[in-house]
Image: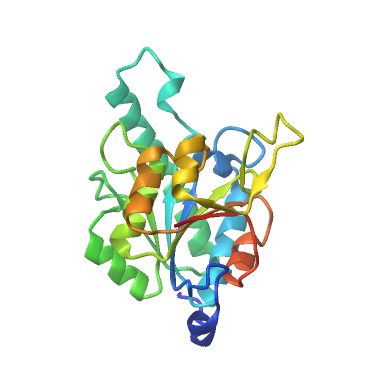
């Protein structure tokens, strides 16, 4: 069942960029699926993400999600393994997270589709751009898994690529910290958080926003990236309501 859409809110709610966010791509790293456990899928955490996505669907936002798989597998866990084989294992891990998120969303009444870059027809659709856009137009949340389908590319790059393919207004990158800092806030109490950054600043400083390929794709196509703390309940809705949350990377 698709939640009721507040179309007036969708047409009139400004973002902090001055744009109206109508279609967003939410990037969830694998780590955030683990909650505080550090590994695996934490059901209560996934249920909260599902509820927050349901809330912004009710505001009228069209929502796509790209999921990582680092809570289950990362290629660097096996440095002696062939890189391509390790990356394909990571792609499969993202499908597990996507199916978990799909289950949580459908339990709160949100219609979803999982699309993967890898062929696995029994559990998910193959990614087809026009079909993904059509799902979004019908009010479904589309979850993209399997990365780009190619080794050596991160899910950050997948997020930038899919966002551009579906015509998203912004990438929301959910992390475990409040935004982008000039140094690691976990180890440096004096780390300073940026409110806004230019794409070139990110690349020149080597800041850990997204990988260089993803940043370059967004820069070339003027696609803003908002990095925020997804562990803080309600942050996604606050962003959609125009509050100044996290770090905005833009032209």
Left or right relative to 113: residue 106: right
Q: Is residue 184 visible?
A: yes
Residue plotted at (68% across, 57% down):
233
Give the quarter of the figure containing the N terminus: bottom left
How are the residues colored? Answer: rainbow
**Residue closest to the eye, 47 or 205:** 205
Q: Is residue 95 visible?
A: no
Left or right relative to 80: residue 34: right
**Residue closest to the eye, 116 or 196:** 196
**Looking at the image, how many numbered discs can be counted on the residues?**
0
Give the quarter of the figure containing the C terminus: bottom left
Location of residue 73 in the rendering, given as x and y in whole percent from the top left corner = 45, 30
Residue plotted at (26% across, 37% down):
150
Q: Quick one: which residue is furthest to the right in this view?
A: 189
Location of residue 65 in the rendering, given as x and y in whole percent from the top left corner = 43, 56
Residue plotted at (51% across, 43% down):
209
User: Is 200 drawn above or below residue 65 in the view shown?
Assistant: above
Left or right relative to 111: residue 18: right
Residue plotted at (31% across, 63% down):
166
Q: Quadrant of residue 213?
A: top left
User: Is 130 drawn above or below residue 7 in the view shown?
Assistant: above
Q: Quick one: which residue is furthest to the bottom in this view?
A: 8
Location of residue 167 in the rendering, given as x and y in whole percent from the top left corner = 33, 65
């Amino acid at each position: 069942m698709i939640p009721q859409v507040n179309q007036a809110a969708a047409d009139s709610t400004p973002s902090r960029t001055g744009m109206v966010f109508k279609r967003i791509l939410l990037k969830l790293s694998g780590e955030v699926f683990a909650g505080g456990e550090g590994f695996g899928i934490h059901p209560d955490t996934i249920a909260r993400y599902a509820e927050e996505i349901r809330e912004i669907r009710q505001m009228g936002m069209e929502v796509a999600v790209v999921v990582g798989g680092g809570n289950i597998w990362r290629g660097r866990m096996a440095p002696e393994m062939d890189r391509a084989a390790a990356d394909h294992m990571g792609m499969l891990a993202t499908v597990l997270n996507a199916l978990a998120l799909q289950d949580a969303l459908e339990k709160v009444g949100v219609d979803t589709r999982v699309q993967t870059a890898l062929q696995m027809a029994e559990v998910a659709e193959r990614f087809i751009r026009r079909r993904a856009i059509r799902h979004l137009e019908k009010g479904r949340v589309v979850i993209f898994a399997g990365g780009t389908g190619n080794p050596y590319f991160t899910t950050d790059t997948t997020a930038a690529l899919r966002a551009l393919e579906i015509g998203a207004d912004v990438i929301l990158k959910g992390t475990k910290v409040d935004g982008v800092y000039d140094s690691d806030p976990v180890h440096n109490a004096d780390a300073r958080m940026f409110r806004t950054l230019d794409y070139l600043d990110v690349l020149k400083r080597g800041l850990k926003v997204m990988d260089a390929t993803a940043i370059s794709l967004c820069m070339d196509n003027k696609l803003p990236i908002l990095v925020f703390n997804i562990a803080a309940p309600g942050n996604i809705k606050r962003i959609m309501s125009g509050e100044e949350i996290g770090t905005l990377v833009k032209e």
